Image (cartoon, rainbow, N blue to C red):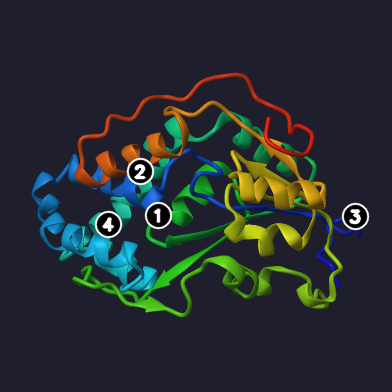
Amino acid sequence: MYEADNRGQTRGYALFDLDHTLLPFDTQALFCNFVLQREPWRAVYLLWFLPVVPLAAAKLVSLRWMKRLFSSYLWGMPKEKLDRYAKEFAETVVRQVAYPAVVAEVKRHRDEGRILILNSASPEIYVADIARVLGFDHWVATRLAPRERMPFLPEIIGPNNKHGAKIPAMKHLLPEDFDPAAGRPLPDSWGYSDSSADVPLLSVCEHGVMIHPSTHFAAIGQERGWTTLTPPRPYRGKWGGRLASLLQALGPYRVRQLSGDVDEPSSTGVE
């Protein structure tokens, strides 16, 4: 049965992607930037990471393995320190850069009684703290094998939480009788993402909201009646976002507070 509140009424769901959806950045690069500014010597990871980037671009190396290799900047860090950094990152940096318009949507769904799930492809290192800071009920992320110190190549448990993998990953949080293959969406449900990779996530919801969608994603959304949010970003376009990620991976990126009025979801298509 669908989850019910104390009055016996069914509750809806609000499902959110993280990177470029709740905030305008890739959180893996942003967290790296946070750590390198506290421990600059860890930038040594670039000596082995950067030479492999062209292989990944040519699809000769898997995204899963690249995610593990990128995390090597945390090599040897004790779990206690990593947990402390994750908490500070969520409470300071994420608070500064999260889109006010999308955070307002999180608050709206919370006020209206929906179950809030943060579902991210990012490694789980900091996702729990981000979910707590932004007021989510549950979170799902790419799982890493627990260790007292971070290994050179952290082991990923299960699938990389991306594309269709996001649905079975949160199955334990959804109604027991819900079957995504049946074509019946969750009742009173909303899904938010910036990427066409999350078409499966938005497809299980009655309402889809695209954040700065690509032309391809916007076309899919228009066919399905999804709406669009285009909150102000601290850079211009796709290449501006890539430059920000590069600077964050190197460590010198300076975070600035995002500000602006809260936008309401618009009509279908790109604003």
Q: Are marks 1 and 2 in contact (CB under 8 Å)?
A: yes
Q: Which residue is mark 4?
A: 82
Quadrant housing residue 236:
top left
123 vs 37: above or below: below
User: Which comes before the other along the chain, label 4 or label 3?
Assistant: 3
The residue sitting at 24% across, 73% down in the picture is: 153
Question: Which is in the foreground here, disc 2 or disc 3?
Answer: 2
- Mark 4 secondary-structure assignment: helix
Distance of mark 1 from mark 2, alpha carbons? 8 Å
Q: Which residue is mark 2?
A: 89
46 vs 34: above or below: below
- Mark 1 secondary-structure assignment: loop
Question: x, y percentage for residue 83?
Answer: 32, 56
137 vs 68: above or below: above
Q: Which amino acid, mark 1?
A: Tyr
Distance of mark 2 from mark 4, alpha carbons? 10 Å
| Dot 1 alpha-carbon crowd within 10 angstroms: few under 14, some 14 to 19, many 20 or more | many
User: Which comes before the other along the chain, label 2 or label 4?
Assistant: 4
Q: Which residue is mark 1?
A: 126
The residue sitting at 33% across, 74% down in the picture is: 146
